[in-house]
């Protein structure tokens, strides 16, 4: 979590930093701060959002052509002015911003306290900059070397930027386990947690690798490893467009992203699906085609919404490719002693490509010899770099903290992976594939059609917006859709919501049902339709309010439910891609009606780079 931005060049740094921090606010929004360096170092920081920082510095001199800024998601130390970044050394000459966690900060802090260091915050970050200062004082090393030595002493994850009042022509950036991108301009460099603050100034970027330190001057960049080996940085062209980062007339990023789904799913399918030939092509995993023929088992690891996508993937892969699948919370998997063999395939799903638990699960599975595929959205993020192969979701930047278009893109990719494996293993006939892929290609149009339910979903939202609890029920691959519907509602509207397999309701949750309890059913006309109807009746018999997502033209559920939302008919395999849409709209409208901050829900951050 935490977003970091840095600039060194000929322009005023402050506006670039503030704009960049707004773009990175999805990473955390507990507090924000900037450091600007001219003849002297000036640090301004404030608890609250980036806009609070802007108000705070109004009227203050923000000049300077070198600077850095930070937006925080608190880990060590409560959100407060004093725990906000940047943090300074004891002599105030050095300043640091940091994303990540220094795990051994306590031991280092104890030692530094013993030497008379005085700390002004409760953060691990402040300890790191004091350590650099201490190394310089003790050894007389220059700043570059002192930073390198300090980084060799810390355990944990970091992306840091350091500036020194003694060297106002240099910024030092380093990373290990937390993302860091350097934008390369003419006589200027940009540093950020992702490319979004950089894209409007340059399309040339360097993704710093783990254990690399960049010494950046206005017209010079030197990259070394923390072992002191000089590196040749690889400059890549950004594909990101500026419009992707704007709200484009929508009230919220979340709504924009919900409406982008016909496009994002289409982009995800493009060049991968050939219905007439009955063929799926996935360039990113092509090299592993033989492996897929012999794989014994697939383990999907992910967190949150991505884990829900994984559950949909389990249904699809088992159904079509006939390979056993297990879906694991990455955070649990990494702390068990899971049985993994070289014949296993692990698929790690992550929108951000940075989630710490998912990364740790990957490392564990890798150690045990499994092949690892990544399903990620952010190009160049850490997970695609540590996996053997993978498939990007191509959903474009997702800025709303609650995941929407990334979920449908993940499900689309998993659908493709299921068919791809089925194809490699001969588990599906060409004719069947032609049939499925033809329908899959129509999904973007069906999502477009489903978005037309918006007004009726809004009207239903009005009716249930004051509820304190809500149940979401579905069967088969609609069960993960129910989980996802519940997660969306709780994270942005703060209504307690649970997702359950519909049949499990009678084993407990039914006790909660009364006239106050809205129960959302995914009740499309597919394999468990009749069973779900029975579950609806059980809820109605207990006076629960039923909101049902049904297949167009359905009359049976309509006669029982309080409210229905019709979605277009599609193959059962693709229902999650369609049924999710009204649930996203439902949580969006309820959150707006309750006056919640839809794009930045409390306590959450989009990239969870801490355990
Ligand atoms: C929910 C949400 C989170 C993420 C989870 C994993 O709307 O966004 O539950 O899905 O934090 O993040 P990624 O996919 O980036 O690994």
Image (cartoon, rainbow, N blue to C red):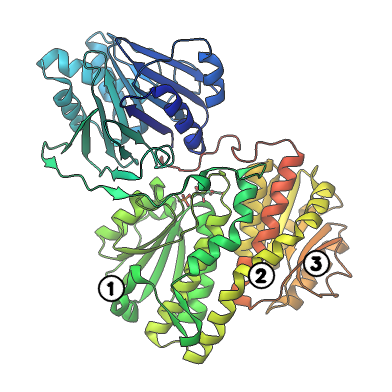
Rendering coords of residue 39 (x, y %)? 29, 10
Q: Is residue 557 left or right of residue 146?
A: right
Viewer-nearest of discs 1 and 3:
1
Residue at the (56%, 50%) spot, across then down: 403
Gap between marks 2 and 3, in whole Å? 26 Å
Q: Quadrant of the C terminus?
A: top left
Q: Is residue 384 left or right of residue 414?
A: left
Label 1 crowd bin: few (<14), some (14–19), many (20+), radius 10 Å: few
Gap between marks 1 and 3, in whole Å? 47 Å
Q: Is residue 315 above or below residue 436?
A: above
Residue 446: image tag: 2
Q: Is residue 312 above or below residue 108?
A: below
Mark 1 and mark 3 lie on one chain; the one further toward the N terminus is 1
Residue highlighted by disc 1: 287
Residue highlighted by disc 3: 536
Q: Quadrant of the N terminus?
A: top left
Mark 2 and mark 3 lie on one chain; the one further toward the N terminus is 2
Rendering coords of residue 584 (x, y %)? 66, 54
Q: Is residue 434 visible?
A: yes
Q: Is residue 576 left or right of residue 363?
A: right
Quadrant location of residue 570? bottom right
Rendering coords of residue 151 (x, y %)? 21, 31
Rendering coords of residue 223 (x, y %)? 18, 37
Viewer-nearest of discs 2 and 1:
2
For numbered disc 2, what is the local secondary structure?
helix
Quadrant location of residue 294? bottom left
Q: Is residue 88 left or right of residue 604?
A: left
Q: Is residue 60 above or below residue 448?
A: above
Residue 194: image tag: none
Mark 2 and mark 1 lie on one chain; the one further toward the N terminus is 1
For numbered disc 3, what is the local secondary structure?
helix
């Amino acid at each position: 979590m935490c977003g970091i931005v840095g600039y060194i060049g000929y322009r005023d740094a402050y506006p670039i930093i503030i704009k960049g921090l707004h773009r990175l606010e999805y990473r955390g929004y507990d507090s924000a701060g900037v450091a600007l360096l001219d003849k002297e170092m000036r640090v301004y920081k404030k608890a609250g959002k980036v806009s609070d920082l802007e108000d705070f510095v109004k009227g203050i001199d923000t000049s300077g052509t070198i600077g850095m800024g930070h937006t925080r998601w608190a880990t060590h130390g409560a959100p407060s002015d004093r725990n906000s970044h940047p943090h300074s050394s004891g002599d105030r000459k050095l300043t640091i911003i940091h994303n990540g966690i220094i795990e051994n900060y306590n031991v280092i802090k104890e030692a530094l306290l013993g030497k008379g260091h005085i700390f002004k915050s409760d953060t691990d970050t402040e300890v790191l900059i004091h350590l650099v200062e201490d190394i310089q004082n003790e050894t007389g090393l220059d700043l570059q070397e002192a930073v390198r030595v300090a980084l060799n002493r810390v355990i944990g994850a970091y992306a840091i930027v350091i500036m020194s009042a003694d060297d106002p022509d240099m910024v030092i950036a380093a990373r290990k386990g937390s993302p860091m991108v350097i934008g390369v301009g003419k006589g200027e460099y940009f540093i950020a947690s992702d490319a979004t603050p950089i894209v409007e100034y340059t399309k040339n970027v360097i993704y710093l690798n783990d254990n690399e330190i960049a010494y950046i001057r206005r017209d010079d960049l030197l990259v070394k490893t923390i072992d002191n080996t000089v590196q040749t940085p690889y400059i890549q062209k950004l594909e990101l467009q500026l419009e992707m980062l704007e709200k484009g007339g929508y009230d919220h990023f979340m709504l924009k992203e919900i409406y982008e789904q016909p496009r994002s799913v289409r982009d995800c399918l493009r060049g991968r699906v050939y219905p007439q030939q009955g063929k799926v092509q996935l360039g990113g995993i092509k090299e592993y085609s033989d492996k897929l023929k012999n794989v014994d088992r697939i383990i999907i690891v992910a967190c949150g919404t991505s884990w829900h996508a994984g559950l949909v993937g389990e249904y699809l892969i088992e159904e079509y490719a006939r390979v056993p699948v297990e879906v694991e919370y990455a955070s649990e998997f990494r702390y068990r002693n899971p049985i993994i063999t070289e014949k296993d395939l692990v698929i790690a799903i992550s929108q951000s490509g940075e989630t710490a638990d998912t990364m740790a699960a990957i490392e564990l599975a890798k150690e045990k010899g499994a092949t690892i595929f990544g399903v990620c959205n952010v190009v160049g993020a850490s997970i695609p770099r540590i996996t053997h192969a993978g498939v990007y979701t191509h959903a474009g930047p997702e800025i709303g903290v609650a995941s929407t278009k990334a979920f449908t893109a993940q499900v689309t990719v998993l659908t493709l992976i299921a068919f791809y494996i089925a194809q490699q293993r001969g588990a599906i006939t060409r004719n069947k594939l032609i049939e499925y892929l033809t329908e899959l290609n129509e999904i973007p149009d069906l999502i477009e059609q489903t978005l037309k339910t918006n007004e009726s979903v809004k009207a239903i939202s009005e009716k249930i917006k004051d509820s304190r609890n809500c149940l979401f029920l579905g069967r088969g691959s609609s069960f993960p859709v129910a989980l996802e519907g519940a997660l969306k509602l709780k994270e942005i509207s703060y209504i307690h919501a649970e997702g359950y397999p519909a049949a499990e309701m009678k084993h407990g949750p039914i006790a909660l049902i009364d006239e106050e309890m809205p129960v959302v059913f995914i009740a499309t006309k597919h394999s468990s339709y009749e069973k779900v109807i029975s579950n609806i009746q059980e809820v109605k018999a207990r006076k629960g309010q039923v909101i049902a997502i049904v297949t167009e033209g359905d009359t049976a559920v309509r006669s029982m439910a309080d409210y229905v939302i019709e979605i277009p008919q599609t193959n059962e395999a693709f229902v999650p891609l369609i049924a999710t849409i009204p649930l996203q709209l439902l949580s969006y409208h309820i959150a707006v009606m309750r006056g919640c901050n839809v794009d930045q829900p409390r306590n959450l951050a989009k990239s969870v780079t801490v355990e």
